Image (cartoon, grey):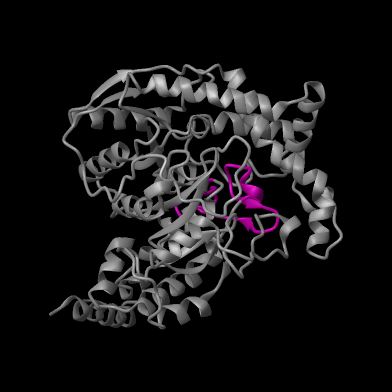
Amino acid sequence: MDRRDFLRGSAAVGALAVAAKPTLAWADADPFVRLDGMAQADLVRRGEVSSLELVDAAISRIEKLNPKINAVVHTRYDKARALASSGDIPDGPFTGVPYLIKDLSELEGEPLTFGSKLFAGNVADRDNGGVARAKEAGLVILGKTNTPEFGLLGTTESELLGAAHNPWDLARHTGGSSGGAGAAVASGMVPFAHASDGGGSIRIPASICGLVGLKPSRSRMFTEGDDEMPGDIGVRLAVSRSVRDTAQILNVSERKGAGAVYEPTGFVTGPNSKRLKIGYSTLNYAGNDASPEVKAALDATAKLCADLGHEIVETKPFLDAEAFLENFMGIWASSPAFLVDNAWLIGLSQFRWTNAEEGLEPWTRGLAEWFEKKEAANPGVVERSVAYFDQVVREYDAYFETLDVELTPVLRTPPILLGEQAPGVPFDQLFERVLDYVSYTPQHNVAGTPAISLPLFTSPEGLPIGSQFATKRGGESTLLELAYELEAALPWGARWAPTSAVNL
């Protein structure tokens, strides 16, 4: 029996079992749901299944799961099916595999709302660089995923698109700003999904949803046609269930040839025998420790690394917390200030009359007000922040001269309940909550260093808690090699959320 016969047989047996035993999981009739993207692409490459079979299976999962989760906010099924059945899919490592794009990125001809009422009628007129590379890799795009307004919060609960619910506990959030992507992958809708990270927005949903989430180095990725933000803190990649999927996505998305800033990683295929010196701390940039649940999970990660022969050394935060927050927020809040000032013009460009009060959420308007007060008191906020970022780059360059890798939490606590950091929470209260909760990830956006969240351990309640590993700029290979080793030592591939395709 070849693999095609096996898959068809599995589907037939699953269908009969469902008829005989109504309590059997619906997903037993779906032979693809437990496969990562590389495995699905291999089936297509061998001619054992068609891309259309993969696409139809993914669409069925989305249709069954999304009413509970709200991960996918726009679909393009007809276009996906047409491409999947056309024979015109580009030949790449992921030819025929279904994929989703975050609604902060341009996908030509499709809505681009940025999670904001201000852009509710906006349609992209081009593909951005990351989407173009995804298409070249052979991915078949089914739709777009949920995101907070402009990606400005670490939770996905926008007024326009609604809250994304965590497949591990529907009362909890999915993280942000790639929360829709995280929920889609954790629930098994697709094997991996497009994501982006300006302050933790790949690593946070990966941690909260039990996934692999790599933030590449600044300037690593292909960005042709993309708009750069002040301070250049944002980067795009994906969230996935397997290290090899993430490694291959990096391979197809990074700059190569004359445009490469770093030596390309290529496709990292497995661990390295080199033992690493790993600096470990659970203190955040303000010197506050993680919650007991997070600390226990990270202690277990450190022990696992030590058991594998790596050297664990205690480290402490070295950035000045007040200076870091002042300058990071100076960049983070500069875009909201621009949006508030130009809300009416943005509305007119879409043939709508609106203003900041109607079109933007309280959190976005609050950030704009924070920025304007800082600018009025001492003009040149952005310029000073950019100069400070250069200082942080130098400090982290020196730091990683003494260490191979750093291990920290991703977040201070396990996943929070929906509503705790929603955009309508009073600004001062929300500001304090966000800066406390998201206090381990933005340092690496400022420093330009790569960092990855791995789903090694959970809280006593069974909620995912990511472990963040970071290294020097351009050092993605080191992180991926270590990730392969940890994945083999403590496999997470068979661990599925309660609200997922395998448990329907």
**171 inside magenta stretch:** yes
Tell which residue pokes out farthest to the left in this image: 1
Residue 229 image position (x, y, % from top left)? 62, 42
Residue 142 image position (x, y, % from top left)? 49, 70
The answer to whether residue 211 is seen in the rendering is no
Count the numbered circles shown: 0
The answer to whether residue 16 is seen in the rendering is yes
Residue 261 image position (x, y, % from top left)? 42, 40
27, above or below 228, in the image:
below
The quarter of the image holding the C terminus is bottom left
Q: Residue at x 54, y 19 (%)?
A: 286
Q: Residue at x 22, y 27 (%)?
A: 310
Q: Is residue 281 left or right of residue 145?
A: left
Tell which residue pokes out farthest to the front in this image: 258
**341 inside magenta stretch:** no
Q: Residue at x 54, y 63 (%)?
A: 68
Q: Is residue 323 left or right of residue 355?
A: left
Residues 209 and 23: in front is: 209
Which span is picked out in magenta?
148-175
Q: Main secondary structure of the magenta part?
A: loop
The quarter of the image holding the N terminus is bottom left
Q: Is residue 319 left or right of residue 113?
A: left
Q: Residue at x 31, y 69 (%)?
A: 32
Residue 156 image position (x, y, % from top left)? 59, 50
218, above or below 356, in the image:
above
Residues 121 and 91: in front is: 91
